[in-house]
Image (tube, rainbow, N blue to C red):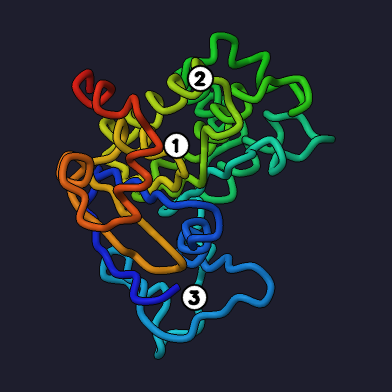
Amino acid sequence: MHNVSFSMNPGEIIGIVGESGSGKSTLLRAVLGLLPAGGRYTSGEIVFREQMLFSNNTRKMDWQRVRGKRIAMVFQDSGAYLNPIRRIGSQYVEAIRAHLPISRKDAQELAVRTLASMGLNDPERVMRSYASQLSGGMKQRTAIAMAASLEPELLLADEPTSALDVTTQNEVLSELSRLCAEQGTGLIMVTHNMAVAAHMADRIAVMLDGRLVELGDTMDVISSPSHEYTRRLLDAVPELEEDMHDR
């Protein structure tokens, strides 16, 4: 990535759009210190609540205090990150207790409440289930619930709905919006779908070849894009104008 620079406010939703290979997911992983093998930081700073997550002068970071509790992440295929041989409840409770000093019983109750708040009608059954027994939408809601339980200040979502059907996609996006509104959680959501970003985001950032080529308020970017690449993305979504009027 080159010259990617922006800031955000608590509770704000930023949608990062661009085609595959543009650097969207790499940006999220850089924020959490999870660059893939071969990736490395060369310059710049990542600042979270006045704390340097990375800078030229700060190479070591106590990520245990940051990941999960203060900054959480929802991946594209959350089912792949759930342990297939452990029940959901076991790993959910373990994740909560890794960050909060509460009993197993209290963690269990917190998990059930949060699953219910995500629209899962039978959270106790979800807790007893294995990942293979849940649908894609249920696994994605479960992943969001696991992140929301710790009330993070920032949530990173990497294509959180791309593998879901349209109806389930809308439901998951609604849960993410509600999380931001109720908990004041900031959300950086990566998507290749400009319509999803337009529906969700307060601001849209457009990435191309590892560079941030446009950043602005959603309506400004949609109605008056300044970069040719943004215009091409918009042209690929013929229903966008009608959808925005319904927003």
Q: Amino acid at mark 2?
A: Val
Q: Quadrant of residue 112?
A: top right
Identified at 46% across, 63% down, the residue is 27
Residue underneath mark 1: 148
Q: Amino acid at mark 1?
A: Ala
Spot occupied by residue 12 in the image (x, y as percentages of width and height): 24, 45
* Circle nearer the N terminus (1, 2): 1
- Picture coordinates of residue 241 (x, y %)? 24, 27
For disc 3, the marked residue is 61
Question: Foreground: 153 or 246?
Answer: 246
- Asked whether the viewer can see residue 58, the reply is yes
Looking at the image, tell me whether mark 1 or mark 3 is earlier in sequence order: 3
- Quarter of the figure with the C terminus: top left
Q: Which residue is drawn at the image coordinates 55% and 53% (left, top)?
A: 20
- As displayed, is residue 205 above or below residue 95? below
Left or right relative to 151: residue 167: right
Q: Secondary structure at mark 1?
A: helix
How dense is the environment of label 1, judged by Cα within 10 Å: few (below 14), some, or many (20 and up)? Answer: many
